[in-house]
Image (spheres, rainbow, N blue to C red):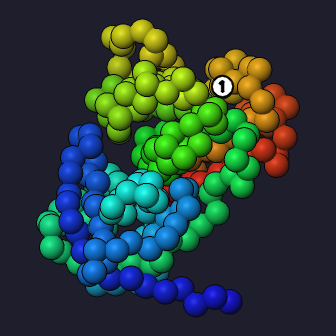
Amino acid sequence: MKKQLNEQYIVKENTAEAPGVRTLKLSREDDTIPSYVPGQYITVYFPELGTPEGKAYSISSAPWEDTLHITVRAMGAFSNRLCAMNPGDRITASEPLGYFYSESTDSTLVMIAAGTGIMPFRSMIVDAVKNNPSRRIKLFYSSRTFHDIVFEKLLDGLWVTHDHFDLQYFITRQDTLPSPIIHSRMNADYILKGVSGCPKPEFLLCGSIPFIRDIWRDLRSKGVPEDSLYTEAFFSH
């Protein structure tokens, strides 16, 4: 078994993304970052908090950006500590890990996210629009309210400027919303209608375990083959 290597990272910036959500921009001591593939994560270690196995956080930056980003919602002792970190603070974390990505370069990427499940998709989208701009990407993103949407300005900007990137928001706990936001829980019918006619769709699902379970079952019941579904579920941190 490959030995997991740990890195010492320095916090370069800590910026707000949405209520209770912060992006930490990290680098090594020499201002470099490790190589990684969009969709991977790092495991952060604070053993003094009683979790020696650490907690995994998706990388939200693209590999060509100057710093490695993790975007964190403050919802527990571990994530609250991360969200409170200042520039110059140090973090011990693993090398990039994981296999939540497509190995194809020409399939349609159908990204299905809820809440902080958007984090790995920012990495994938930002990288693709620069390095593979003709690739079709469909993002379906569910959030409680419009103000809870993470990376909203970035996503809206890419939606306007890149013809092959499409975006659909779903809001579940806010009644008054501008068009074309859908006030509903996401389901397979919405998703499959949105990707009708797209070549070779691959479905990547990221969010809470109940969200992933329900959408996965719904897509399978509508005939989506299991080998076209990729999942990444998260726990509260």
Based on the displayed image, in which of its 4 quarters is residue 222 positioned? top right
Residue 185 percent across, percent down from the top left? 54, 25
Residue 19 percent across, percent down from the top left? 24, 40
On screen, 23 above or below 34? above
Label 1 sits on what residue type? Ile
Q: Quick one: label 1, few (<14), some, or many (20+) residues within 10 Å?
A: many
Residue at x-position 54% and y-position 86%: 4
Residue at x-position 26% and y-position 40%: 18
Q: Secondary structure at mark 1?
A: helix
Left or right placement of residue 166 versus residue 72 in this view: right
On screen, 90 above or below 78? below
Residue 112 percent across, percent down from the top left? 58, 37
Residue 129 percent across, percent down from the top left? 51, 39
Please identify the quadrant where the C terminus is shown: bottom left
Question: Residue 147 or 60: which is nearer the viewer?
Answer: 60
Question: Residue 18 or 201: which is nearer the viewer?
Answer: 201
Residue that numbered label 1 is attached to = 191
Residue 174 in sight from this viewpoint: yes
Please identify the quadrant where the N terminus is shown: bottom right
Question: Residue 224 or 15: which is nearer the viewer?
Answer: 15
Residue at x-position 27% and y-position 43%: 17
Question: Residue 20 or 138: which is nearer the viewer?
Answer: 138
On screen, 37 above or below 216? below
Based on the displayed image, in which of its 4 quarters is residue 79 positioned? bottom left
Residue at x-position 37% and y-position 27%: 157
Count of numbered labels shown in the rendering: 1
Residue 54 in sight from this viewpoint: no
